[in-house]
Amino acid sequence: MFGGIRDRIFRIQKHSRSARNEFFGAHPSLPEGLVDPAPAGRSSLPTESLTDPPTTTKSSQSVVIKPSETTNQDISALDKSVEHPHKDHLIHHPTPPRSFFSSTSLAVHPNVEAVHSSSEEDLRMPNIKVFSGSSHPDLSTRICERLQLEVSKASLKKFSNKETNVEIGESVRGEDVYIIQSAAGEINDNLMELLIMINACKIASSCRVAAVIPAFPYARQDKKDKSRAPISAKLVANMLSVAGADHIITMDLHASQIQGFFDIPVDNLYAEPAILKYIKESIPNWQTSVIVSPDAGGAKRVTSIADRLNVDFALIHKERKRANEVEKMTLVGSVEGKVAILVDDMADTCGTICMAADKLVEAGAEKVYAFCVHGIFSGPALTRLNASKFEAVVVTNTIPQDENMKKCSKIQCIDISMILAEAIRRTHNGESVSYLFSHVPIC
């Protein structure tokens, strides 16, 4: 009886292989010898003795064998096309590799046609649109070049009564939208422009809207340091959330607790890796330098850089009479005969860092450099820098610096577009951005 069953199964397997080859057209993904040939010399026996004959359809064949009618040894000899009892025999189409559905790089397969799939991963990876506000179009262009994208079309203008008018020039339905706008130039107008752009994309059925704000506006108004003082940074956070932002990407917040003002994800990136790279490549004798903080609030930032460079650090304690005016400075630490490197998060009127430079030279520093992430340079800043004792003042391009560099030869600029571009890419692909806290991406 068992011999008859086995012969019947082998005949069905042979017919199934022919059907599969005809169906796939001898697809290269099907290996040769998928079904073992029937043993030579085996004779066929009548099938009328079988109690459960097989069911045949036009497109496929299925065999169902009851456990009571065979043994484990017989089952192990069956072809893979014979499924477990009570399951249909299914032939699956080959699945394209994962890279077709993944956007690990936004231009991995530029010449591959779209592959249609209903997988959840394909649905989770919408396309991407990057818009630029009017505050820093050069940075937006650099970011898009690194992402191998074009800046998306948007019309930004003002009516005769100075109201801001925004028109999104292309469809954003189902897209991941990133809007790049920094706290530069007319900060209030640019902030309002950003809010309108976020809301315009949100009500146009975009999937997600992320605001990329390299320099966060009103970041210094982060606490109530005197009676009746507003916490304007919290107000800006509320406005961004109400406008429809789903995610914030920024760089070197003046106070890290500003992240807590939001109920949406905030990625606070750091320019520290880029600054470290610049120090090692451009400052002679940096191995014997001293990293100096111009105030107590920057002590954590300075100690982090000093530890990674394995050098000493110092601190300048300052007492302010009022905003942007310093009354007295006291140096804590030794800089005699060494290169002093001042590090701060922003340079506005530059009164503080210029007084700090004078203090360091008086204390015996050979050369003095300044590194500031955000170069605002308002008011008399450029005049003070030209008359200062700095060898160089190095800032990043979170704020446009072209005009400032023309007016002051001491200003040098570090491009951080690669950090922001990599953050956008990783956010869009659902990857971690913590790598950027300690490395400069190579792209």
Image: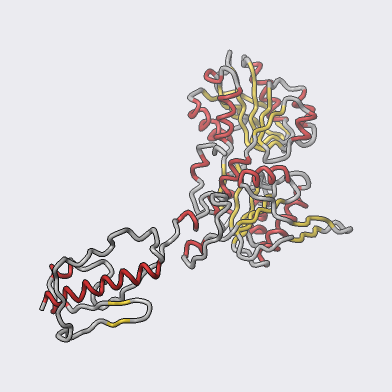
Taking the view exactly as shown, the residue that stands out farthest to the front is 41
Give how far across and how far down residue 235 sits, in percent.
Answer: 67, 55
Query: In the figure, 261 relative to 141: above or below?
Result: below
Query: In the figure, 62 relative to 407: above or below?
Result: below
**Which quarter of the figure is the N terminus placed in?**
bottom left
> Looking at the image, how many numbered discs can be counted on the residues?
0
Give how far across and how far down residue 149 sits, in percent.
Answer: 64, 50
> What residue do we see at 59% from left, 37% from top?
271
Taking the view exactly as shown, the residue that stands out farthest to the left is 1
Query: In the figure, 323 relative to 116: above or below?
Result: above
Q: Which of 79 and 105 is in front in this view?
A: 79
Give how far across and how far down residue 47 sits, in percent.
Answer: 18, 83
> What residue do we see at 54% from left, 39% from top?
441
Is 86 displayed left or right of 232 in the figure? Answer: left
Taking the view exactly as shown, the residue that stands out farthest to the right is 160
Q: Nearer the viewer, residue 290 or 161?
A: 161
Residue 320 figure quarter: top right
> What residue do we see at 21% from left, 71% from top?
10
Q: Nearer the viewer, residue 43 or 243?
A: 43
Residue 228 seen in render: no
The scheme the figure's colours follow is: secondary structure
**Which quarter of the figure is the C terminus placed in?**
top right
Residue 253 figure quarter: top right
Residue 73 seen in render: yes
Give how far across and how far down residue 422 sits, in percent.
Answer: 56, 45
> What residue do we see at 51% from left, 50% from top?
104
